[in-house]
Image (tube, rainbow, N blue to C red):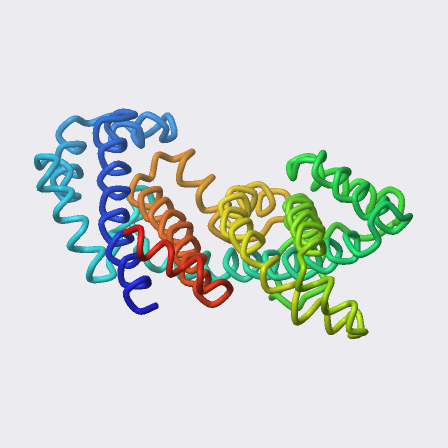
Amino acid sequence: MGRYILNRLLRWIPSVLFILLLIYALVFFGAGDPIKLIFLRAPGDVAYDEARVEAIRESAGLNRPFLVQFGGYVWNILHGNFGNSLVSGRSVNSMLKAAVPVTFQIGLSAIFLLSLIGILLGVIAALNQNKLVDNIIVGFALMVWGVPVFVAGPLLIVFLVLVMGMDVPYGWEGLFSPQVIVPLLVLGLNPMALIIRQARAGVLEVLSEDYVRTARAKGLPRHIVVFRHILRPVMTPVVSQIGLLVIATLNNSILIEKVFGLPGLGRLTETAIKSSDYPVILAIVFIFSAVVMASNLLVDIAYPLLDPRAAAKKTGDE
């Protein structure tokens, strides 16, 4: 198992470096000079001064060759320094320090809830195949899957305000504030449908195995059969699905934070893109990429715990 985890870690490090190189190249050769863009988007009373632009570019280190800039950027990241904002001059670290906890709390809570509820509903649906409960759960999964987050958020706000007469759940007062319930529902319902379908399909497949039929023939209670003999093999594909859903959750967080006024990475991303604040954009993309790759790494590490035979086979193939 140690060799298996080590192989994954050794693959993860160069992948992160490649993503950093790709992102930095897109910014360097991409959408124009950030300093000029900032001046062009400034209020009309701010005069464009080429000498001032060059001075700002030199102070920010943007007049150096590409590889020199990239090497310096990687070196700064290794020391935990993402630079300063080109627009406000603030430290990017301080901006991330305020935004990252909000997004991570919302995202991790949504993933936990959709996983827990999705697996539970999927198991219940499979154990009651073709019955009313199964039809209701499958119908619910199809309904929430068909409504994208950018539609579900505004619709839910309209329903709560106009139909229920409630106040708009806007702003951030902590994870355990009642205002967080609605954003969590909107963020988690859509991907929950995939977990329900994956868990249901996995349970139905395992139910036909000989060892499950033997356990049931021995008269073991249903909950013992489910927890001892069914859930473990079912969890392997479900965990893989959860790892992929981290990407969707991060993407949807940008929309959710905009709709519900949450001061997280989503809103910071929108502000940075509008103002061409490249250091902030680079830092956010790096964090998102690192989180996605870390989630995939955790999924790979979870395989040996859920199915040691699969891990041994993969290690042997490598």
Q: Is residue 45 left or right of residue 17?
A: right
Picture quadrant where residue 26 is located = top left
Of residues 216 and 267, the one drawn nearer to the viewer in this rendering: 216
Q: In the rendering, at what x and y percent does residue 54 appear?
A: 13, 32
Q: In the rendering, at what x and y percent does residue 186 appear?
A: 68, 47
Of residues 77 and 59, the one drawn nearer to the viewer in this rendering: 77
Q: In the rendering, at what x and y percent does residue 284 appear?
A: 38, 47
Residue lying at 27% horizontally and 47% vertically, measured from the top left: 15
Q: Is residue 127 left or right of residue 209?
A: right
Picture quadrant where residue 281 is located = top left
Q: Is residue 60 above or below residue 63?
A: below
Q: Is residue 98 above or below residue 285?
A: below
Picture quadrant where residue 43 is located = top left
Q: How many marks?
A: 0
Q: Is residue 168 left or right of residue 40?
A: right
Q: In the rendering, at what x and y percent does residue 125 appear?
A: 79, 52
Q: Is residue 62 left or right of residue 150?
A: left
Q: Quadrant of the N terminus?
A: bottom left
Of residues 291 and 30, the one drawn nearer to the viewer in this rendering: 291
Q: Is residue 34 above or below residue 141?
A: above
Of residues 95 and 255, the one drawn nearer to the viewer in this rendering: 255
Residue lying at 47% horizontally and 50% vertically, measured from the top left: 265
